[in-house]
Amino acid sequence: MTITKRLSHEYLRKGWMQVALGIILLLPFAIGLSLLYKAWPLLAPSGLIDVLLGSEWSPMQGKFGLWPFISSSIIVSLMGLLFMVPVCLSAAIFITQFAPAWLARSLRSVIDILAGIPSVIFGLWGVMTIVPIVGDLATSYGAGNATGYSILAAGIVVSFSVMPFILNMLIELFESVSIELKESALSLGASYWQVIKDVIVRKLKPGIIASFTLGVSKAFGETIAVLMVVGNVVQVPKGLFSAGYPLPALLANNYGEMMTIPMYDAALMLSALILLIIVIFFNYIAHKVIRYYHARI
Amino acid sequence: MRNSNHVSSIIDQEIIRKDQAKGLHNLIYVKDLSLWHGKQQTLKNVELNIRDKGITVLLGPSGCGKTTLLKTFNRLSDLYPDIRTEGSIFFEGKDILSKEIDVYDLRQKMGLLSQRPQPLPGTIAENIRYALKLKGIKAKSEQDDRIAHYLQKVALWEEVKDRLKSPAGRLSIGQQQRLCLARGLAIEPRVILADEPTSALDPISSRKIEEQFKELSQEFSIVLVTHILRQAKRLADYVAFMYFGEVIEKGRPDVLFEDPKTETFKEYLFVGH
């Protein structure tokens, strides 16, 4: 093969990689821009604040207040976080610090299986088990909505569907701590629990915060499992037992009709854009947290 | 092998008698200690005395069991559920390996300096403060005084006194190791267990740690694990040579290095690693 031929081959291969890289880099911008373009007809006349914080949603009258959806999304993902943190942290600590090797191995394969379960199954399971339990709870508390299809049910189900993902990150994180560091702390006369609390968790704090931030972001975007148990009533949730209507559910339930009502498509595109921005924002925060602590520890 | 054990044990008795005549005492007695990692035996009938004050060097090639022996002294071996021991280690009149021993108390009497420096997350001051808290010293002013004291003791004070609140991880590796030594001293141990403490350091930092050890050996019993022959020659007051889980030869360095009894040790001295 001549040198020019070889060089041109080399160049061609490199060129391919650059194209592939370009596609990946441009994709989020392309999606974001096309969403913005489609949302513009709604955004331009009403203004961002009115659309984001307006709570009246009547597409037939041309009212597109997104606050019921945004607030539902925020509450559901925060509730998911609330359930996630204690369970995931204790499970990760148990698996990496206390469980005998054989048990840790089998627990890890259970987590992998959980991670592979499609979220529609989590949703279905939530409908059959979580919703009735929440319904009973609501009845005993005398809540207005006693069906069980609620923010609370959605928070629980979303935490389950996101847990395997976070657990895998946390386990990897906890396994990164060297046995020598543990030995050094133990040698000072610390108990095993003190070592975990004061040394290991403290050392891993940025990674733990980042993992949960990514978890919230995933919960925010979780669509089908939440949609199945949250009730899908357009309202700003007034309590744990009240039904809600998160952004992804809005999109999934209504994309079919968006062409039939004027401006409906723009409203849905704007919801999608908000969802995209929030998820990217959370990922950015996770990244920042790690950078910030890296400079300090 | 059995024979060599016998020979060194006679030498040992002689040394004990001489030591006691000089008023020197043994602090730790290892008696017929065997240890298994699962089915694999890593220590075989170890007999060893660690003198009060001075530096005892555990010398031997990698994988000979010297670190394992060191970690049974402060029961870090408890971390590994598949470790099983037989025999005893007597310290302050009690068998360290017995179930009744208070391991937290034991570990505070045996400070550990590990192979690579292991600063705790947090600042330089917090590293020592944590040890002081575990020791039960609660008053902040007392803690501050002691932090300064121990940093001076390892000759780190001048280098870090203006940045006590900066992260310990930002110190150089050599400084980190001296910080870890200061932290270990802050729990007021009787024994310092050092597991190849200079293996990650540059020559100048290594020399500093060695100088510290020489000084500290006036006050503490130091058990130093090393595979560096020259370091053993520089520091040892007493040497035990280990090979495949056995203590093959032991004694004073002047006697031992001049007149090795076994072929294995002769070869080790000749190759010099």
Image: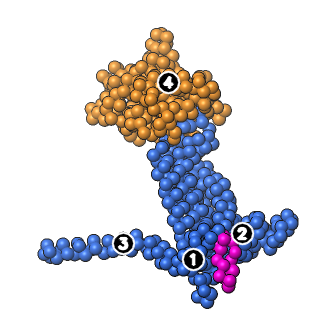
Q: Which residue is mark 3?
A: A22
Q: Earlier in the sequence, mark 2 or mark 1?
A: 1
The region drawn magenta spans A54-69
For label 2, the crowd category at 10 Å Cα-Cα, with few meaning under 14, some 14 to 19 and many 20 or more, is many
Residue lying at 55% horizontally and 49% vertically, measured from the top left: A205
Residue lying at 34% horizontally and 20% vertically, measured from the top left: B255
For label 1, the crowd category at 10 Å Cα-Cα, with few meaning under 14, some 14 to 19 and many 20 or more, is few
Q: Quadrant of residue B265?
A: top left
Single out the residue that lies furthest toward the left: A2
Foreground disc of the pair 4, 2:
2
Q: CA distance from mark 2 to mark 1?
A: 24 Å
Q: What is the x, y in percent for residue A254?
A: 63, 82
A132 in relation to A263, above or below: above
Q: Quadrant of residue A225?
A: bottom right
Q: CA distance from mark 3 to mark 2?
A: 41 Å
Q: CA distance from mark 4 to mark 1?
A: 67 Å
Chain for mark 4?
A: B
Task: Kindly check if marks 4 and 2 are in contact, taking CB atoms under 8 A apart as contact.
Answer: no
Q: SS class of the residue under badge 3?
A: helix
Please give the label number shown on residue A45: 1
Please give the label number shown on residue A236: 2
Question: Foreground: B75 or B30?
Answer: B75
Foreground disc of the pair 2, 1:
1
Q: Which residue is mark 4?
A: B148
